[in-house]
Image (cartoon, rainbow, N blue to C red):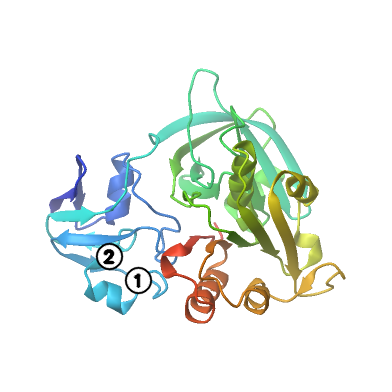
Amino acid sequence: MTFKVSIQHNDINFTTSTDDIILDSALESKINLPHGCKNGTCGECKCQLVSGSVTHEEYSSVALSAEELADNKILLCRSVATSDLVLDLPGFVNGFPIKTLPSKIASIEKIGSVAVLKLKLPASQNFDFFAGQYIDIIHGGKNRSYSLANSPSQAGILELHIRYRAGGVFSESVWNEFKVGQILRFKGPLGSFTLKDSSAPMLMVCTGTGFAPIKAILEQMIAHNSKRKVHLIWGNFLPEDFYMTEVLPIWQQQLDLSVTLCSNENTPADFYNGLVTEFVTKNYPDLSHYQVYACGNPGMIENLYNTAANQLKLVKTNFFSDVFTPSV
């Protein structure tokens, strides 16, 4: 059974069905509704259900609390319509058009366990995106999501950071099969983990290749000569898991940027020995005037959100996240 979904105060409508997640139906209709993780963890797709009814698949209480559910808030990435719907997404404007395009592998640079894959776009095609968004690579009959690691100001190239994962179809292909000049198709831009309009100081907290969208946002801030105060807190289990650290002192000359690297074992003297959330808790007892951008594994995101909101006075609406889960 199909239903009509309307966005209040916006001339946007699309159809969904009892077999489809609402967000998936919107993206299929090339309507880029706010979203991040697509698995009910980050809360970026939360909106007000004005009328109609839905069922929810499993989600994290970090993304949608019991109080918000009682107030008719829903997660677009976890909801299935059971009637026609009217949704309220204040401030939503359908962003850049979602396209499916070919690209050519321009380079593959392997740095430890991370491959920096650069894709060259066709000269005849425009591809616009916001720093922090992601694309779906279409490979092996499946879509795999990767954040764009470069800013939109770097025209014609898309940069992806791919951690090697034994048995992972895409990462194995990057490591062992892909060649420069090979064609890859992708769909995008997708997601809403983007820089919000504010002058508030920022904590940018990431683990692993969650550094990728953070890198894109920082590079865009540099391009726009931003004066915002930023503290980048980046965690990996081992010091050798970090990559591209040579850019960090360069950024510090161009932004009001502090950097802390955190690791759990064999920690160098200039690193923090421990988890990123531990560092934030010890050094930021009052986050009431901050915005927090977090990207990485689900456990870190949930732990950081709960700690910041419940112990460190962070305004809940000033927490923005993108959850990374391993692709197979």
Q: Residue at position x 26%, y 55% from top?
A: 20
Q: Of the residues shown, which amino acid type is indicated by label 1?
A: Leu
Task: Point out residue 5 in the picture as x, y percentages from the top left corner.
Answer: 18, 50
Q: Estimate the spatial distance between the alpha carbons at disc 2 and disc 1, rounded to whole Å.
A: 7 Å
User: Which residue in the protein does label 2 denote?
Assistant: 74
Q: Residue at position x 31%, y 53% from top?
A: 23
Q: Residue furthest right?
A: 269
* Residue 306 relative to residue 52: left or right: right
Quarter in which the N terminus is drawn:
bottom left
Task: Point out residue 212 in the picture as x, y percentages from the top left corner.
Answer: 62, 50
Q: Nearer the viewer, residue 37 or 230?
A: 230
Number of marks: 2
Please tell me whether residue 212 is drawn above or below residue 236 in the rendered image: above
Q: Residue furthest bottom?
A: 311
Task: Point out residue 289 in the picture as x, y percentages from the top left corner.
Answer: 52, 66
* Residue 70 relative to residue 157: left or right: left
Q: Secondary structure at mark 1?
A: loop
Q: Based on the displayed image, in which of its 4 quarters is residue 190 positioned?
A: top left
User: Which residue in the protein does label 1 denote?
Assistant: 64
* Residue 123 relative to residue 118: left or right: left
Please tell me whether residue 55 is drawn above or below residue 174 in the rendered image: below
Q: Residue at position x 68%, y 62% from top?
A: 234
Inspect this view and state whether residue 69 appears.
Answer: yes
Q: Secondary structure at mark 2?
A: strand
CB-based contact (under 8 Å), mark 2 and mark 1: yes
Inspect this view and state whether residue 166 appears.
Answer: no
The answer to which of marks 2 and 1 sits earlier in the sequence is: 1
Task: Point out residue 10 in the picture as x, y percentages from the top left corner.
Answer: 21, 43
Q: Nearer the viewer, residue 110 or 43?
A: 43
